[in-house]
Image (cartoon, grey):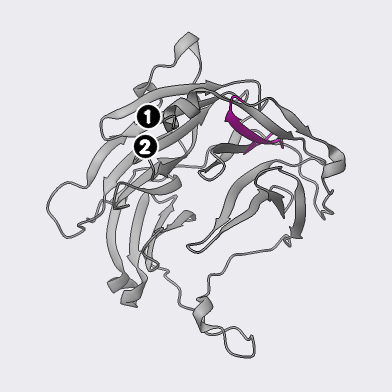
């Protein structure tokens, strides 16, 4: 079987879904659990809607409208009562960050472990099984900027990758929070100069990172404001160029998902397009007739990629 890097080097557009209205794609999520693999791809859009697509064909299978004044609350599904009534709220942690929380990520294997990042420059790791906030906070790292995304990485998923809104990159070992050993494996306030791209290509921002468990490596995705994508390998030694993807998006790419089952890369961005990339593929357009137009109370037009304000000030605690 070809290595995953060989697959990356031969990626081309397999399917393209054009937007049916003025909106852009904010986030993607593939549904999966330990016992089964779902065919559903959830697409979060700027018009306050969530679209459900087939992960293989990209055809729209449903939508969910979210009200303008909406918020997200997490509940423990084990506490749902027999009559279907919701149980007690697990709790609220309000002291560990001093500004807007911009990203959260549960550990893929340890259900009670949660990482959070905020515009205060702090990245916290909690053990929710320990109860109160003071006890639950097990590690704090300082990225000295506004955190944009987090990813659990490493063979034992005991490392944490943090990207910031001003293109900083930090990789920490959080396996031993009480150890005197340094937590930092890699750190750069601006990681873009760490890798040279061929043919004068421009690396203007990072989309995010993901842990590839089969090959035990980090895939980092960056891009240009004109829609070009760059696949990079990330480790404690730095960044290494793998492949550039062109001819797909025409604006900033906001999100991606690697589908390990289908061996495809899914990308979405400010041009409103949802793309599927596969090795050696020939493009199939998913026409408008295959999509349902969501009804939105607010029509948002495509906006340029904006950086969030950076705040510094609190020191590293762990």
Residue range corresponding to the magenta coloring: 268-280
- Where residue 127 sits in the image (x, y, percent)? 33, 68
Please say whether residue 152 is visible from this viewpoint.
Answer: yes
Q: Tell me the residue that label 2 is attached to.
A: 169
Say what secondary structure mark 1 lies in: loop
What residue is shown at x 70% (from left), y 33% (from top)? 15
Give the main secondary structure, helix, strand or loop, of the magenta stretch.
Answer: strand
Q: Tell me the residue that label 1 is attached to.
A: 191
Q: Height in image: 161 above or below 140?
A: above
What residue is shown at x 50% (from left), y 18% (from top)? 202
Taking depth in this image into account, of 124 and 309 the one nearest to the observer is 124
Specify few, some or many for label 1: CA neighbours under 10 Å numbering under 14, 14-19, or 20 or more. many
Image quadrant where residue 16 sits: top right
Q: How many marks?
A: 2
Taking depth in this image into account, of 212 and 210 the one nearest to the observer is 212
Q: CA distance from mark 2 to mark 1?
A: 6 Å
Q: Quadrant of the N terminus?
A: top left
Disc number placed over residue 79 in the picture, else none: none
What residue is shown at x 58% (from left), y 51% (from top)? 29
Say what secondary structure mark 2 lies in: strand
Q: Quadrant of the C terminus?
A: bottom left
- Where residue 58 sits in the image (x, y, percent)? 71, 43
Q: Height in image: 290 above or below 242?
A: below
Taking depth in this image into account, of 8 and 227 the one nearest to the observer is 8
Q: Height in image: 119 above or below 16?
A: below
Q: Mark 2 or mark 1: which comes first in sequence?
A: 2
């Amino acid at each position: 079987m070809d290595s995953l890097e060989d697959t990356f080097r031969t990626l081309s557009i397999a399917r393209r879904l054009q937007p049916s209205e003025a909106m852009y794609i904010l986030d993607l999520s593939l549904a999966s659990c330990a016992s089964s693999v779902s065919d559903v791809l959830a697409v979060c859009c700027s018009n306050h809607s969530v679209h459900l697509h087939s992960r293989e064909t990209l055809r729209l299978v449903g939508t969910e409208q979210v009200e303008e004044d909406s918020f997200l609350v997490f509940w423990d599904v084990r506490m749902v009562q027999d009559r279907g009534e919701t149980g007690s709220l697990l709790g609220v942690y309000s002291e560990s960050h001093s500004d807007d929380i911009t990203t959260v990520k549960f550990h893929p294997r340890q259900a009670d472990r949660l990482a959070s990042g905020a515009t205060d420059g702090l990245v916290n790791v909690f053990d929710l099984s320990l109860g109160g906030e003071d006890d639950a906070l097990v590690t704090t790292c300082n990225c000295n900027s506004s955190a944009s995304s987090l990813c659990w990485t490493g063979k034992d998923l005991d490392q944490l990758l943090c990207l910031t809104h001003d293109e900083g990159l930090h990789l920490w070992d959080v396996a031993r929070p009480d150890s005197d050993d340094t937590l930092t494996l890699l750190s750069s306030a601006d990681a873009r100069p760490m890798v040279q791209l061929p043919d004068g290509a421009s690396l203007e921002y990072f989309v995010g990172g993901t842990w590839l468990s089969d090959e035990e490596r980090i895939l980092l995705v960056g891009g240009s404001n004109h829609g070009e994508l760059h696949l990079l390998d990330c480790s404690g030694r730095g960044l290494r160029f793998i492949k550039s993807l062109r001819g797909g998006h025409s604006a900033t790419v906001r999100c991606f998902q690697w589908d390990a089952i289908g061996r495809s890369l899914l990308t979405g961005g400010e041009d409103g397009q949802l793309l599927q990339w596969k090795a050696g593929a020939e493009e199939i357009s998913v026409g408008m007739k295959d999509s349902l137009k969501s009804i939105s109370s607010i029509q948002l037009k495509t906006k340029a990629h904006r950086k969030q304000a950076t705040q510094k000030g609190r020191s590293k605690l762990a």
